[in-house]
Image (cartoon, rainbow, N blue to C red):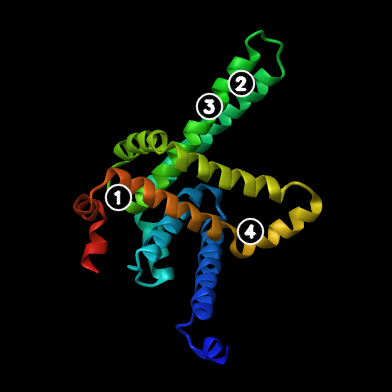
Amino acid sequence: MRKMIFDINSPLWRFMGFLGDLVCVNLLFLLTSVPVITIGASITAMNDVFFKLREKRDNGLVRDYFRAFAGNFGKSTVIWLLYLVFLAGCVLNFNAVFHTDLPQKKVIMIILGAVIFLLSTTVMYSLAMFARFDNDLKDTVSKAFVISILCFPYTVLMTLLLGVSFLISIENLLYLLYAFAFWFLIGFGLVGYLCSRLFLRAFRRFTRQEDLMALMPEEEEEQ
């Protein structure tokens, strides 16, 4: 027991270091997401950090985060803002149809729900791909859409992870208070870390190792 407590290479200390990384990434994510328009770049930066941590090629968590945030700011912000605009339109249409008596009401609502789902998952994969590959916006979005469909089990798992986490958080006032502390301290980092594993599995299904190295940003090859 004493050896485990004082040995920095013990499982206990490695786990504590892992928790520290999650808390740090979580705080960085919150800090850079204060202006809502930057959330897209924050998600990309968080994915970049977790990809590198999983593959043991990180060069300092804070340094990697802000490098990815700045390097992908333009593309990530464009797709995030477009997503918010289209999402708002879909939600308004969904709400309008919900309060009508159209005979095809259920069909229209199902179609709108499917559109929102595909739109959200495509953006989710696109932001992860910005952190992984050096492609232009159009190419990334088209490939993200295809991968989200072909890797549907991973897509569903990530959607459930995000959805269940949110629903539990708002179930009642008591949970809301606990949820606030959870999301503020570690929540976004933990969910991002779990999703990063699914993203990597999805990407590796369609990318050979030599192609993967060629598609990574040049800055990583230079380090």
Label 3 crowd bin: few (<14), some (14–19), many (20+), radius 10 Å: few
Q: Amino acid at mark 4?
A: Trp
The disc labelled 3 sits on which kind of residue? Answer: Ala
Q: Secondary structure at mark 4?
A: helix
Label 3, label 2: how far apart the Cα atoms are: 9 Å
User: Marks 4/1: CA distance?
Assistant: 28 Å
In depth, the one of 127 and 21 nearer the eye is 21
Identify the residue at horizontal 70%, vertical 51% (top origin).
169
- Does residue 74 appear in this view? no
SS assignment at label 3? helix
The numbered mark, 3 or 4, whose residue comes first in the sequence reads 3
Disc 1 vs disc 3: which is toward the camera?
3
> What numbered label is drawn on residue 183?
4
Residue assigned mark 2: 109
Q: How many marks?
A: 4
Q: Position of residue 173 (x, y in %)?
A: 80, 51
